[in-house]
């Protein structure tokens, strides 16, 4: 379980998170929606400590962090070992093969043997239909393939939570569908996931719970059915604006 309490993040001229308190249950998919600039990515990146709020606390399983205090390297590493982030751009190492991209973390951070890390990598590649790419380099793959490799790399670290920051926003519709099918499969397997997305159909089909964020505040926290079928006037306007 991830618990955020009274989390506050302010930039020079922008209040990105305003007294945010929210829980993220295990073995569920929580989807974060909201207009651009609402604070969705800041909220997600705060969990992985890529952003550092000025106030509030976070509990991540047995780890407790007070954002008002200086964080130690040990705390940061402990948090990041329990979470794995998949970004909008896939961020694969261009000089490493697909197999090397996936096995680097498990070998040097988790201290797995080369054989163990490679077996796990092949299992994950088979899961996303890309085992034949193991010895290729990222430049030899499509964007959708690279994003699926990024998901394999995250899964290889055995995180408690998978964090996705608009993972399909840089892809065309066909490639987006490839990645969304992988995310739906992970959701069906009850991985603990937090996903920031603009894809309403994905949110409707996959989310166990939806958060609607606006102006740094959580304005809705509830089920997919409640969000889409019994929306507030503000959410109705948001959903209408998302349609072509």
Image: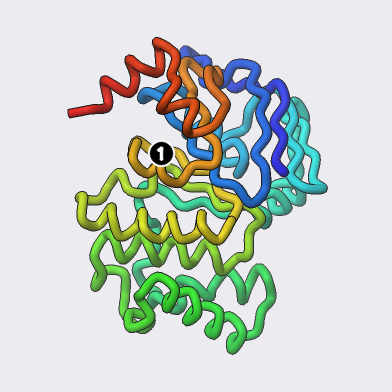
Label 1: state its secondary structure.
helix
Location of mark 1 (residue): 204
The colour style of the image is: rainbow
Residue plotted at (37% across, 44% down): 202
* Quadrant in which the N terminus is drawn: top right
Look at the picture and state if 232 lies above or below 56: above
Residue plotted at (70% across, 40% down): 2
Neighbor class of circle 1 (other Cα within 10 Å; few <14, some 14-19, many 20+) is some
Residue at the outermost bottom position: 115
Decide if residue 200 is on the left or right side of residue 143.
Answer: right
Percent across and percent down for residue 122 are 47, 81
Residue 11 seen in the current view: no
Decide if residue 230 is on the left or right side of residue 104.
Answer: left
Residue plotted at (55% across, 61% down): 189
Look at the picture and state if 114 lies above or below 41: below
Decide if residue 52 is on the left or right side of residue 214.
Answer: right
Q: Quadrant of residue 196?
A: top left
Residue 78 seen in the current view: yes
Residue plotted at (58% across, 56% down): 191
Percent across and percent down for residue 9 are 59, 22
Percent across and percent down for residue 222 are 56, 28
Look at the picture and state if 182 lies above or below 214: below
* Quadrant in which the C terminus is drawn: top left
Count the marks.
Answer: 1
């Amino acid at each position: 379980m991830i618990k955020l309490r009274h989390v506050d993040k302010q930039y020079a001229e922008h209040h990105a998170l305003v007294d945010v308190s929210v829980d993220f249950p295990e073995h569920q998919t929580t989807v974060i929606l909201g207009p651009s600039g609402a604070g969705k990515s800041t909220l997600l990146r705060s969990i992985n400590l890529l952003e550092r709020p000025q106030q509030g606390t976070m509990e991540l399983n047995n780890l407790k962090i007070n954002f008002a205090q200086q964080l130690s390297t040990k705390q940061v590493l402990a948090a990041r070992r329990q979470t794995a982030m998949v970004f909008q751009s896939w961020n694969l190492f261009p000089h490493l093969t697909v197999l090397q991209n996936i096995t680097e973390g498990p070998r040097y951070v988790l201290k797995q043997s080369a054989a163990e890390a490679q077996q796990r990598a092949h299992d994950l590649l088979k899961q996303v239909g890309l085992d034949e790419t193991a010895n290729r380099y990222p430049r030899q793959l499509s964007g959708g393939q690279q994003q699926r490799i990024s998901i394999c790399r995250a899964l290889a670290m055995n995180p408690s939570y998978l964090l996705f920051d608009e993972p399909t926003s840089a892809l065309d519709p066909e490639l987006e569908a490839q990645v969304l099918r992988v995310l739906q499969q992970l959701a069906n397997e009850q991985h603990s996931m937090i996903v920031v997305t603009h894809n309403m159909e994905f949110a409707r089909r996959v989310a166990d719970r939806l958060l609607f964020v606006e102006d740094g505040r959580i304005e809705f926290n509830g089920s997919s059915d409640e969000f889409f079928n019994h929306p507030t006037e503000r959410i109705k306007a948001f959903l209408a604006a998302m349609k072509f």
